[in-house]
Amino acid sequence: MLNLTGKNALVTGIANNRSIAWGIAQQLQAAGANLGITYLPDDKGKMEKKVADLVEPLQPSLFLPLDVQNDGQVESTFNTVRDKWGKVDILIHCLAFANRDDLSGDFSNVSREGFDLALNVSAYSLVQLARAAKPLMTEGGSIVTLTYLGGVRVVPNYNVMGVAKAALEMNVRYLAAEMGPINVRVNGISAGPIRTLASSAVGGILDMIHHVEEVAPLRRTVTQTEVGNAAAFLCSDLSSGITGQILYVDAGYEIMGM
Ligand code: 0WE
C-alpha cells in the first residue's frame, strides 16, 4: 500500500486552505510523510502567520521562507533543510505567477518583463529547486510539479501562463532524464480548474468550471484532495517505474474533442 513513512517531503506553494499544495500536504502527511512547509514571506509577516496556523495540525518538522526570486533565501532555506533533515525524499513544486494584466486580453501584448516574470517564477523555479534538492536526494526521490492544460492547448486568457506551463512540462522531461540515474523521478500533475486564491483572481473562472462540469467524463471538477492523492501516488513506491510524465487529474476533460 501507499506508505511514505520515513520520507521527508518539502512542500512549496501553500497560501491558504484552498491551495492545491495544501491538499497535497495533507495527503502526504496522511500517508506518513514527515513534512517541511515553505511559505512566501511578505513584509508584514502576515503570510508566515497564516500558513503557520493552517499547517500546525500537520506538525511539520520544518517551516521555512522560500521566495524563488531571492537566490540567497533559497540557498539558506536549503542549507537549513540539509542541516535539520540530512536528506530530502520528496519535493512538491506548486509555484506560479504572472502579472494579472497578462492573464487577459491579447496574448501578444505581453511585455518582455511580464514574459520574464511568468517564466522565471512558474518554470525556472522548478529547475532552481530541483538543483538545490538534488544533492540532498541521496536515497533517490520524487519531484512533483503542478501544471495545466493551458500549457498544451490554447485556453482563453491563460496567455503567458500557458507558455510558462509548456516550459515547465519540458523542464519535467529534461530533469527526469538528468536525475533518473540517481533514482530521482520527476513528474507533473495537470490538474483541472479548481477554485483557489490564484484562479479566483481570474475573470471567468466560474464559467470555465461550469464548462468542465458539463463536458468532462466525470461531469464534475476535481478536488484538492484528489490532486493530493495523485501526488502521494507519484511520491510513493507505487509509481516507481514512472518518470518524466504528466498525469492528468482533471475528471477526464483532456480526452474530449467536442
Ligand atoms: O495556473 C493557474 C493560475 C496561475 C496564476 C493566476 C494568477 C491570478 C492572480 C498565475 N498568476 C496569477 N497572478 C495574479 O495576479 N491556473 C491553472 C488557474 C487558472 O488561471 C487562469 C485560468 C485558470 C484555470 C487564467 C486564465 C484563464 C484560466
Image (tube, grey):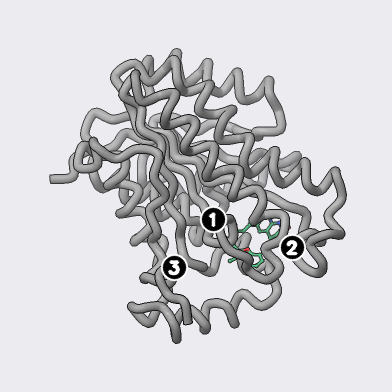
Residue at x 23%, y 36% (from the top left corner): 240
Residue at x 64%, y 56% (from the top left corner): 162
> Which image quadrant is residue 225 in?
bottom left
Q: Earlier in the sequence, mark 3 or mark 1?
A: 1
Q: Nearer the viewer, residue 237 or 54?
A: 237
Determine whether the residue tagged by mark 2 lies in a helix, strand or loop.
helix
Residue 103: which disc?
A: 2
Determine whether the residue tagged by mark 1 lies in a helix, strand or loop.
loop
The amino acid at mark 2 is: Leu
Q: Is mark 2 within 8 Å of ligand 1?
A: yes
Q: CA distance from mark 3 to mark 2?
A: 21 Å
Residue most toward the bottom? 214
User: In the image, which is nearer the foreground, mark 1 or mark 2?
Assistant: 2
Label 3 Cα crowd, 10 Å radius (few <14 / some 14-19 / many 20+): some
Residue at x 24%, y 37% (from the top left corner): 241
> In the rendered structure, are the residues bearing label 1 and label 2 in contact, judged by CB atoms less than 8 Å apart?
no
Q: Which residue is mark 3?
A: 254
Left or right of 224: which side holds 202?
A: right
Q: Which residue is mark 1?
A: 16
User: In the image, which is nearer the foreground, mark 3 or mark 2?
Assistant: 3
Above or below for 154 versus 240:
below
Q: Nearer the viewer, residue 202 or 242?
A: 242
Label 2 Cα crowd, 10 Å radius (few <14 / some 14-19 / many 20+): many
Determine whether the residue tagged by mark 3 lies in a helix, strand or loop.
helix
Q: CA distance from mark 1 to mark 2?
A: 22 Å
Q: Nearer the viewer, residue 174 or 191?
A: 174
The amino acid at mark 3 is: Glu
User: In the image, which is nearer the foreground, mark 3 or mark 1?
Assistant: 3
